[in-house]
Image: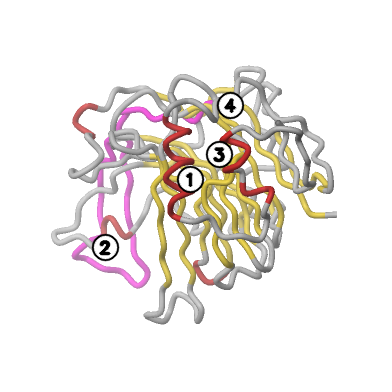
Amino acid sequence: MPFSFIKSKPQRKSIIDKLNPFHKPYELISRKKRRWNNMLISSGRFHLTNPNPVDKCGWELTFQDEFNTSSLDQDKWTTETFYGARYHPQNITQNSPASAPREYLSPDNFELTGNSIKLIATDEHVNINHTSSPPRPDVDGNYTIRHQVAQIDSYHSWQSRNIDWRQKYGYFEIRCRMPNSKGMWPAFWLYGEGGDEIDIFEFYTGKGDFGFESNYHFYPFGTSTQRHIYRRQEHKTYHADQEFGIYALSWDSNRLRWLYNNRIIREIRNPGFHKPMHIIINTALDKQSDRGQFHLAEFPNSFEIDYVRAYRKI
């Protein structure tokens, strides 16, 4: 059933309908309801086979990519990172001794199928020369990165061409299928000024007891301060590497609501997200030994996306 905040009045409600918080759009989900939702998701009761319609009652479409072309739409996406590098410099500068970054964000690790895009992770090596500003002889030099991954972003401030889609509040939706391999870390997230971040999902394919996390990082006074509000929640899923699922966020001035297959699975009061944010979709490597099972990872593997859409409340 397509997402809508318009209340319906069915003659008879199933147990799933009774648990659907759309009937009480301003009520925070209780822990009991959250457990029920996770149980129903993991059993397949929130299973969807078809994509949502593009039109949503009460919402205006503001951003859309159905990935039905033969190449990435350069007017909507960049494969560069918002911080200006194709690897995380902290992997070098914050390790002692300095070590190579765990992954390289390749501009070529994409496959357009005609109706979807695949973000591909490979074990192909790439050599880089890292230089710091100001120079740091203890970490500057050549490194070999052992894996390549992919990322697309709706905003980039480092390049001359205009890639700048950001939005404050709205409904953000993706339909996708997770990698069929251990050790992967695909994500769909929003990023804003001052380091603020809303993770619609971060999926850990090596974790066996749950599917993904919904997270947020909020810096009330900017990243230069020690004040950092971080909250995460685990969610179960259903055959996410075999079938497409729909993951979404509804964000307004008062509430954040995370949805899986059109069902709210988490709802919180807005802790302070009131500035425009841009969309980032990426696949990455989960090398944390306690959860990732990276030693079982198979390459190449792909994170497949059917579509991504964003809306603004009318």
Query: On the image, which quarter does residue 16 sit in?
Result: top right
State the CA–CA distance, disc 3 to disc 1: 10 Å
Q: Badge 4 local density, few (<14 within 10 Å), some, or many (20+)?
A: many
Instruction: Provide the residue designation for mark 2.
Output: 93
Q: Residue at x 61, y 55 (%)?
A: 156
Q: Badge 2 local density, few (<14 within 10 Å), some, or many (20+)?
A: some
Query: On the image, which quarter does residue 3 sit in?
Result: top right
Which comes before the other along the chain, label 2 or label 3?
A: 2
Instruction: Provide the residue designation for mark 1.
Output: 201
- Give the amino acid type for the residue marked by disc 3 in the picture: Tyr
Q: Nearer the viewer, mark 4 or mark 2?
A: 4
- Give the amino acid type for the residue marked by disc 4 in the picture: Ile
Q: Residue at x 59, y 40 (%)?
A: 263
Which comes before the other along the chain, label 1 or label 2?
A: 2
- Give the amino acid type for the residue marked by disc 1 in the picture: Phe
Q: Please give the range of residues in magenta.
A: 117-146
Element marked by disc 1:
strand
